[in-house]
Image (tube, helix red, strand yellow):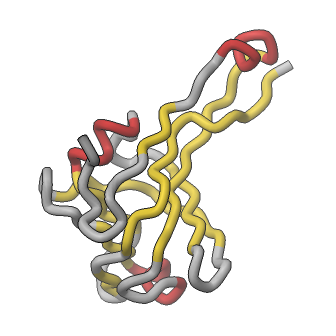
Amino acid sequence: MFIEVLKSKIHRVTVTDADLNYIGSITIDRTLMEAAGLIEYEKVQILDNNNGERFETYVIAGEANSGTICLNGAAARRVQRGDIILILSYASMDFEEAKRFKPTVIFPDTATNRLVK
């Protein structure tokens, strides 16, 4: 049996932009992506703390250390600049492996979207 478990989580970052006229996706600061173990084009779930929206999209790498969190395309209608969001990805794995698996969770500074040292 395979189950889906949390693989990666970026906890509480601030939306810096929303670009309705882009193809789609979420642009994430590459430094945050790497710290969370996310790769470009990976499917992610977005949870908006401000309005309760929950939706899926895919990741595009933004400039490293820029603090960029930009929702693109149709997803731009689900958020506003300044909203606090969580970004999650999941992995499918064997039930026994899932019992031992530990997700990567990062807690950036919400004001700057940069890693806290």
User: In the rendered view, does 38 fall on the left or right side of 95?
Assistant: left
* Picture residue at 14% right of the left edge, 53% below the top: 65
User: In the rendered view, does 112 fall on the left or right side of 3?
Assistant: left
Question: Where 51 sits versus 66, above or below?
Answer: below
Across and down, in percent, residue 84 comes to 47, 74
User: In the rendered view, does 70 fall on the left or right side of 63?
Assistant: right
* Picture residue at 32% right of the left edge, 73% below the top: 70
| Along the viewing direction, whichever of 38 and 74 lies nearer the viewer | 38
Question: Can you tell which quarter of the image residue 31 is in?
Answer: top left
Across and down, in percent, residue 113 comes to 28, 62
* Picture residue at 20% right of the left edge, 58% below the top: 62
Count every numbered label the image shows and give the total. Answer: 0
Question: Where 89 sits versus 68, above or below?
Answer: above
Question: Can you tell which quarter of the image residue 73 is in?
Answer: bottom left
Question: Where 1 sits versus 21, above or below?
Answer: above
Across and down, in percent, residue 102 comes to 59, 23
Across and down, in percent, residue 43 comes to 51, 50
* Quadrant in which the C terminus appears: top left
* Quadrant in which the N terminus appears: top right
* Picture residue at 55% right of the left edge, 64% below the top: 46
